[in-house]
């Protein structure tokens, strides 16, 4: 059976499962739509959380970035892993005890202010739309590679699929769909890694193959990769040109941004209690570790195989006549450019130019590099083809990449939907709205968000790789949402004035800094022009401390929160003293708005 047929079987089969689950678990109430009825088993929720967490940035982009950035790309691995631990241990149980299933809802009640709630809605939308732009770019990469179409067309197809199961099923449908997507994506990620590890090192465990000797050679895989890249003029794979402070800032932004991500926090409200949320967080960490410990090996293998198959290869002009042209090149003693390269070239994500006219492709550092476009987000999907693995493995990886991108996109759509329908409409503008109307508004909001996210994904492809776009979202969350959540839980003196000042201080300068250096006048600037030498990916970590300081200073300079709010903060740190079920408080009276 051909590779194309295997790909269609895996993709069509998995999509049928996702849509079937969405229909089976169709949300019938706002409770189902927002928090899946609070009755998801902790292990099941842990798996769904892992799928929600391991987005296109984790599945598609992280290994690609590490492959070409080497040690410098490890900030994404360290930051996201550490960030999840921080969220699971430091914040999630207390937020679950508080009982509010959206971040703006927590901010509005904790800081007894409609204004604070509205600013939190704005922050959540900024973060979510930035994050989902990266996911939709991943969807476009996966679909364009699968269907052999242009990148933008791939995004349009992905928009249609997300629309069906996110708008129809809500959080209930998304939760069980994400369980299926986790099974697909983790199998798709590890199986080719095992194959390639066996081919290169003879070790079936990728994590060990990464540090093992190359098969038949008395040299480790990493040492050989270092030698190969330095011979081509690149930096050693195990080194980086990033400053230590910038690496620290990016890692910090990713870590603390995780603790402020609305689409991850909302997952802890689909279980029945704060205790179940802790168990769920532990299981999610186990499921996440399976992929994250494999990623460095996938990255190293991809870089080595890419250089081996592309460098000094002879360009084949026609994909339709590929076999004939390739056979003639081999007969003449040459090495034809691999077919996988020609396949991806159609998508516009790869390009070459024979600058010296010798008919061969030189992959080098500097101006004479003839690989003129190389989108690193394609490498996890292309890896099985580069390694010449069986067609069914290639089809499986395509299905896994789509599962990763779509699972997180759906979770983010729920945040956007709930922010508009619940926090903005029902809790602020139309307080007499009934459940049926709110559910209808939520679905319309999700549908509109799908369309907006698709077009943002098309635009974001011009700016950066998926993981870098996602890193901007983490920076925004670290600077704007993490300080008010953290201080709101652990410091009862934090008041509404401090919260408002803190969120604005974090959001505005972080967004403007990213805009300036990625879109605006400073787009061509280098590290010398960055504030304190910190890149746009890491600046959220710097402004997070400014935001914390401003929040504390303003709170101390203004009136203390009402006593009932201070008592509430004390209560949520003692498990069992405050029991609620997300949408409606069951054990305490509603918190008053002390405007």
Image (cartoon, rainbow, N blue to C red):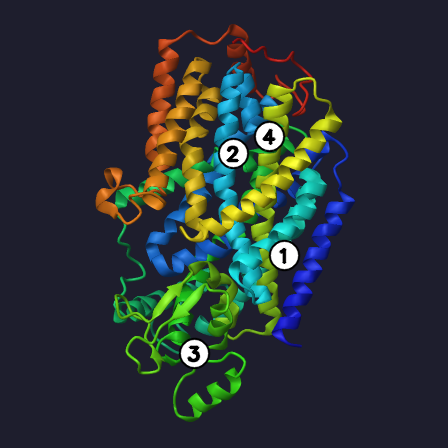
Query: Residue 515's quadrant in the figure?
Result: top left
Sequence-earlier tag: 3 or 1: 1
At 45% across and 49% down in the image, what residue appears?
Answer: 460
Labels 1, 4: front one? 4
Query: Residue 43's quadrant in the figure?
Result: top right
Q: Which residue is mark 1?
A: 184
Q: Which residue is mark 4?
A: 420
- Where disc 1 sits, the SS reads helix
Sequence-earlier tag: 1 or 2: 2
Q: CA distance from mark 2 to mark 3?
A: 44 Å
At 35% across and 73% down in the image, what residue appears?
Answer: 353
Relative height, residue 387 to residue 502 (above, below): below
Labels 3, 1: front one? 3
Give the camera-side residue of 362 and 172: 362
Q: Which residue is mark 3?
A: 337
At 44% across and 39% down in the image, what residue appears?
Answer: 474
Q: Which mark is residue 125?
A: 2
Q: CA distance from mark 1 to mark 4?
A: 31 Å
Give the camera-side residue of 490 and 143: 143
Relative height, residue 76 to residue 591 (above, below): below
Q: Quadrant of the N terminus?
A: bottom right
Sequence-earlier tag: 1 or 4: 1
Residue 164 placement, left or right of 198:
right
Sequence-earlier tag: 4 or 2: 2
- Taking the image as drawn, is residue 512 in sight? yes
- Contact between marks 3 and 1 (CB within 8 A): the answer is no
């Amino acid at each position: 059976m051909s590779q194309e047929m295997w790909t269609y079987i895996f993709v069509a089969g998995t999509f049928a499962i996702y849509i079937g689950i969405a229909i089976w678990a169709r949300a019938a109430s706002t409770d189902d739509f927002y928090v899946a009825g609070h009755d998801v088993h902790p292990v099941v929720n842990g798996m769904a959380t892992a799928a929600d967490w391991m987005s296109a940035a984790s599945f598609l982009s992280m290994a690609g970035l590490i492959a070409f950035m080497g040690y410098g790309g490890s900030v994404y691995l360290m930051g996201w892993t550490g960030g999840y631990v921080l969220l699971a241990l430091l914040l999630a149980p207390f937020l679950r005890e508080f009982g509010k299933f959206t971040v703006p809802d927590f901010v509005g009640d904790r800081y007894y202010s409609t204004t604070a709630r509205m600013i939190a809605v704005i922050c959540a939308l900024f973060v979510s739309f930035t994050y989902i732009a990266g996911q939709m770019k991943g969807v476009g990469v996966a679909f364009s590679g699968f269907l052999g179409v242009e990148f933008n067309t791939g995004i349009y197809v992905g928009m249609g699929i997300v629309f069906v199961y996110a708008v129809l099923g809500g959080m209930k449908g998304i939760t069980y769909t994400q369980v299926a997507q986790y099974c697909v994506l983790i199998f798709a990620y590890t199986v080719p890694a095992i194959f390639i590890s066996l081919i290169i090192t003879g070790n079936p465990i990728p994590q060990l193959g990464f540090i093992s000797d190359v098969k038949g050679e008395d040299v480790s895989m990493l040492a050989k990769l270092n030698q190969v890249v330095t011979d081509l003029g690149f930096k050693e794979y195990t080194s980086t040109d990033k400053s230590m402070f910038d690496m620290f800032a990016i890692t910090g932004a990713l870590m603390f941004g995780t603790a402020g991500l609305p689409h991850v926090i909302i997952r802890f409200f689909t279980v029945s209690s704060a205790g179940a949320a802790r168990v769920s967080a532990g299981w999610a960490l186990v499921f996440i570790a399976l992929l994250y410990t494999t990623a460095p090996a996938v990255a190293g293998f991809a870089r080595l195989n890419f250089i081996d198959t592309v460098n000094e290869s002879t360009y084949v002009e026609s994909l339709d006549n590929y076999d004939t042209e390739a056979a003639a090149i081999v007969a003449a003693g040459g090495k034809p450019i691999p077919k996988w390269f020609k396949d991806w070239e159609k998508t516009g994500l790869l390009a070459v130019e024979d600058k010296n006219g010798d008919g061969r492709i030189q992959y080098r550092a500097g101006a004479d590099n003839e690989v003129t476009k190389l989108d690193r987000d394609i490498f996890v999907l292309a890896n099985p083809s580069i390694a010449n693995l069986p067609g069914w493995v290639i089809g499986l990886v395509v299905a896994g990449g789509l599962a990763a991108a779509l699972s997180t996109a759906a979770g983010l759509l729920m945040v956007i939907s709930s922010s508009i329908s619940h926090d903005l409409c029902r809790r602020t503008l139309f307080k007499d709205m009934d459940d049926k109307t709110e559910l209808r508004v939520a679905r319309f909001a999700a549908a509109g968000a799908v369309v907006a996210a698709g077009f943002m994904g098309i635009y974001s492809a011009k700016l950066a790789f998926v993981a870098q776009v996602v890193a901007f979202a983490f920076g925004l969350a670290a600077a704007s949402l993490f300080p008010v959540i953290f201080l709101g839980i652990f410091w009862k003196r934090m008041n509404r004035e401090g919260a408002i000042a803190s969120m604005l201080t974090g959001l505005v300068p972080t967004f403007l800094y990213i805009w300036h250096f990625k879109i605006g006048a400073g787009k061509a600037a280098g590290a010398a022009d960055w504030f304190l030498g910190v890149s746009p990916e890491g600046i959220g970590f710097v402004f997070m401390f400014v935001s914390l300081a401003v929040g504390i200073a303003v709170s101390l300079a203004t009136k203390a929160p009402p006593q009932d709010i201070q008592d509430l903060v004390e209560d949520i740190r003692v498990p069992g003293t405050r029991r609620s079920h997300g949408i409606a408080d069951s054990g305490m009276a509603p918190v008053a708005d002390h405007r």
